Amino acid sequence: AWSGMLGNFAAGVFMQVLRPYKVGDFIQAGGVTGTVKELGLFGTTIVTPDNVTTIVGNGKVFGDNIQNYSALPVRRVDCVAKVANSVNPMDAIARLQPVIAAIPNVAQSPAPEINILEFTAEGPKLAVRPYTHTDHYWQVYFDTNKAIVETFGAAGYPVPETPVAHRTLAG
């Protein structure tokens, strides 16, 4: 038990010196994702997005990867939009571009990216990637998906159909 406590303490000292994150940052560390509430010498208190307070030993935090989503001014939101084969993907991109850029809290720089991601049997998939500050990530994520549905509906695009596997009867 003492070795664990000493390891957490030593890691806590290194954390205070290196400062990979600060109180208020949204991070993933020690297998936990959330907002840093407290930085202690033995552990870091993180509040998860579903509002659970979790204390992670600094030894575990320091011994694993740390992702700090708040370190940079903006973060990319990744959404995917599928269009039917009968829809021109370039038309879909042209329609989405101004709508996505107009979503509240979407950063103007870098500008939202909308590109063809891949082709499937049902139709092309578009990567729809606006940027926003971490504080607005989920609002922009949900607003982007809503904008995709509304834009494609207003354009009269058909819903991509999932192919049905055909079975044959042996006989």
Image (cartoon, rainbow, N blue to C red):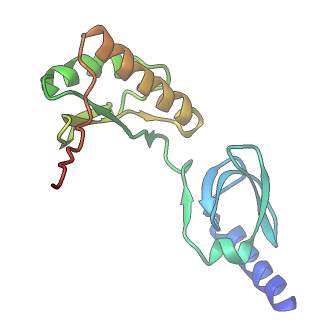
Q: Is residue 14 visible?
A: no
Specify whether 86 is left or right of 127.
Answer: left
The quarter of the picture where residue 14 lies is bottom right
For the C terminus, the quadrant is bottom left
Residue nearer the viewer, 124 or 96? 124
The quarter of the picture where residue 111 lies is top left
Quick one: which residue is furthest to the front in this view?
171
Q: Residue at x 65, y 64 (%)?
A: 19
Q: Residue at x 75, y 73 (%)?
A: 12
Residue 150 rendering spot, x and y as whole percentages: 37, 14
**Residue 81 sits above or below residue 20 on the image:** above
Residue nearer the viewer, 3 or 54? 54
Q: Disc count in the image?
A: 0
Residue 49 rendering spot, x and y as whole percentages: 67, 44
Residue nearer the viewer, 52 or 55? 52
Q: Is residue 72 visible?
A: yes
The quarter of the picture where residue 114 lies is top left
Specify whether 11 is left or right of 159.
Answer: right
For the N terminus, the quadrant is bottom right
Residue 106 rendering spot, x and y as whole percentages: 44, 27
Quick one: which residue is furthest to the right in this view?
2
Q: Residue at x 76, y 85 (%)?
A: 7
Residue 3 rendering spot, x and y as whole percentages: 81, 91
**Residue 137 sits above or below residue 17 on the image:** above
Q: Residue at x 81, y 71 (%)?
A: 41
Specify whether 106 is left or right of 53.
Answer: left
